[in-house]
Image (tube, helix red, strand yellow):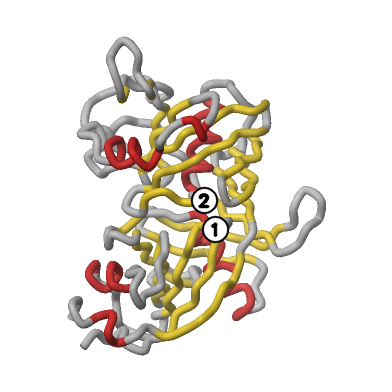
Amino acid sequence: MSALANYPFRKMNGLGNEIVVVDLRASPLTVTPDEARAIARPDGGTPYDQLMTLHAPRVQGTDAFVRIYNNDGSEAGACGNGTRCIAHLLFDETGKEALTFETASGLLNCWKANGAHGEPGLVTVDMGVPRFGWKDIPLAEEFHDTRGIELQIGPIDAPVLHTPSVVSMGNPHAIFWVEDVAAYDLGRFGPLLENHPIFPERANITLAAIKGNDHIVIRTWERGAGLTLACGTAACATAVAAARLRRTGRTVRITLPGGDLGIEWRERDDHVLMTGPVAFEFEGRFAPSLFAAAS
């Protein structure tokens, strides 16, 4: 039987981005892809967009090593909404005002924040420096200008979507610029574009509509998870891509189906800061029957 049977977990969300948190800092356990898929099962499991597992720190000065799983069992390098969730838990546990996590994509710094109008309970995550080189994203072939690459879906003479901006925020993103994000069947196009041969590690697919110099509306098909109410790295990637195209400034409000995130692409060091809320839903223990097929 899986060692995760009866193991405690917490269910949280960041703007509706469903997050399950498992604290393994005092345990040598790791989660296998089969176990990650089992936990996400709708029949008796706890469906999620991302599963965040906390492990004992490996780097001096950090608060935890974090592994991030999509609901298909694949691992992700970054999850902004999930990072806010685990930061919120550790703020309460430790009394700290700032934390540092190690992930597969590097170190992430987090701190407590207040909103533009003083609203409390927000968390800011320094998502690091975006990457634009075609090998860094990565792409399967060379593009000198990743502000818009040759990729389209639909007829050649009348494509439905075309010329996305591509960015890595620790995971690959393709942003298609549209007038109305609700006018497209992203549930249909998302899987095709996520698995397009141009993306050797697959990609997060975002539809983005510029509403002003400081406001963008987006919808995202998340790699390994599907349609989501919010994707923090997609919000960061979109903000950066829009600023590179001079369609917005470097500080924007990103409206997702689940709510708003504040994104700042800081000029002095190119770091991307994401600020948003966290919601705690419930805590529980994994049913042993979940892992019958995974053991």
Residue 269, image quadrant: top right
Which structural element holds mark 1?
Answer: loop
Left or right: 120 as drawn, with respect to 198:
right
Left or right: 197 as drawn, with respect to 75:
left
Q: Where is residue 56 shown, x and y percent of the image?
A: 40, 77
Residue visible at 67% across and 26% down in the picture: 213
Up-down: is 153 above or below 120? above
Q: Nearer the viewer, residue 268 or 255?
A: 255
Crowd class of label 1 (few under 14; some 14 to 19; many from 20; radius 10 Å): some
Query: What residue sits right under mark 2 in the picture?
Result: 230
Asked if one can make out residue 57 in the rendered structure from this viewpoint, the answer is no
Crowd class of label 2 (few under 14; some 14 to 19; many from 20; radius 10 Å): many
Type of amino acid under label 2: Ala
Left or right: 176 as drawn, with respect to 256:
left
Type of amino acid under label 1: Gly
Quarter that holds the N terminus: bottom left
Instruction: Measure how far apart labels 2 and 1 are at the Cα level.
Output: 6 Å
Mark 2 in CB contact with mark 1 (< 8 angstroms): yes
Query: What residue sits right under mark 1 in the picture?
Result: 16
Q: Where is residue 110 shown, x and y percent of the image?
A: 58, 60
Left or right: 253 as drawn, with respect to 155:
right
Residue visible at 33% across and 61% down in the picture: 71
* Number of disc labels: 2
> Which numbered disc flags the more N-terminal residue, 2 or 1?
1
